[in-house]
Amino acid sequence: NAGVMQNPRHLVRRRGQEARLRCSPMKGHSHVYWYRQLPEEGLKFMVYLQKENIIDESGMPKERFSAEFPKEGPSILRIQQVVRGDSAAYFCASSPRDNSPLHFGNGTRLTVT
Amino acid sequence: QQPVQSPQAVILREGEDAVINCSSSKALYSVHWYRQKHGEAPVFLMILLKGGEQKGHEKISASFNEKKQQSSLYLTASQLSYSGTYFCGTEYVGSARQLTFGSGTQLTVLP
């Protein structure tokens, strides 16, 4: 059973470009979460999605950031017009239902130059 | 509002014990514990639901004190492989299901 798959592992973007991060949850998991982690810091919640629905986006910046989890295909975290402060590791996690453990992907390390 | 973890860092010798604490100012529904090694994904250790239960995983166990809104992670007879950063993640009563993580406790086990 494949784990949570994130790609790309590393992404380099210049300021002003767009970054698209993909996450395929574990088979049978309908809950997807995105977290951001700065070096030597904790995991900051961004957004919680279920298929075709955003359940909680209280951790998402109001501008430039969006997320989706379509009926078919992976969840996408999209960052428009990236700035240097967006450089971080972005982790996706999935779970099959409420009150169950989160399974994390290996993350996408975004570097904005 | 994120939970508060203590200590921030701890250094042990192999075979020694450690306790990591996680406390919240809001009513907790559940507490999760994860371990993350440098450059890797966080790995689930255990989940505790409100009710004061205690769980164990190999030589790692945890408790959840609902009255104090606290959880503690106990590592006994630590092994080199226990090194990493430990995060508690909390779910709050009455809020949408999301985990809020503490800032982490860096554990180093020396031979």
Image: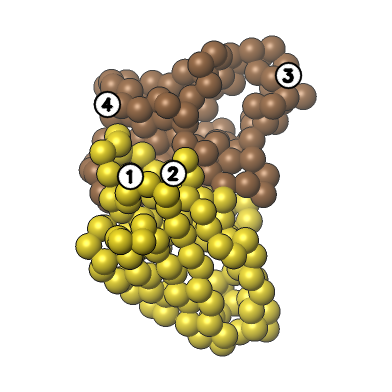
Number of numbered discs on residues = 4
What amino acid type is highlighted by mark number 4? Lys
**Mark nearer the N terminus (2 vs 1):** 1
Q: Quadrant of residue B69?
A: bottom left
Residue found at x 67% / y 49%? A40
**Percent of width and height locating residue B7:** 59, 65
In the image, A48 versus A92, the foreground residue is A48
| Mark 2 surroundings within 10 Å by alpha-carbon count, few (fewer than 14), some (14 through 19), many (20 or more) | many
Task: Classify 10 Å Cα crowding around label 1: few (below 14), some (14-19), many (20 and above).
Answer: some
Circle 3 sits on which residue?
A: A14
Spatial CA distance of label 2 from label 1 is 9 Å
First in sequence: mark 3 vs mark 4: 3
Q: Chain of mark 3?
A: A
The residue that label 2 is drawn on is B100
Q: Are marks 1 and 4 in contact (CB under 8 Å)?
A: no
Q: In this rendering, do the residues under marks 2 and 1 share a single chain?
A: yes
**Mark 1 chain:** B
Labels 2 and 3 touching (C-beta < 8 A): no
* Kind of residue at disc 2: Thr
Amino acid tagged 1: Tyr
The image quadrant that residue B68 belongs to is bottom left
Q: Colour of chain A?
A: brown
Q: Which mark is residue B92?
A: 1
- Name the residue rendered at 64%, 79% in the picture: B12
Q: Which chain wears yellow?
A: B
Q: Nearer the viewer, residue B3 or B57?
A: B3
Q: Is residue A60 above or below residue B103?
A: above
Task: Identify the image quadrant of the C terminus of chain B.
Answer: bottom right
Question: From what the image shows, is residue B63 above or below residue A91?
Answer: below
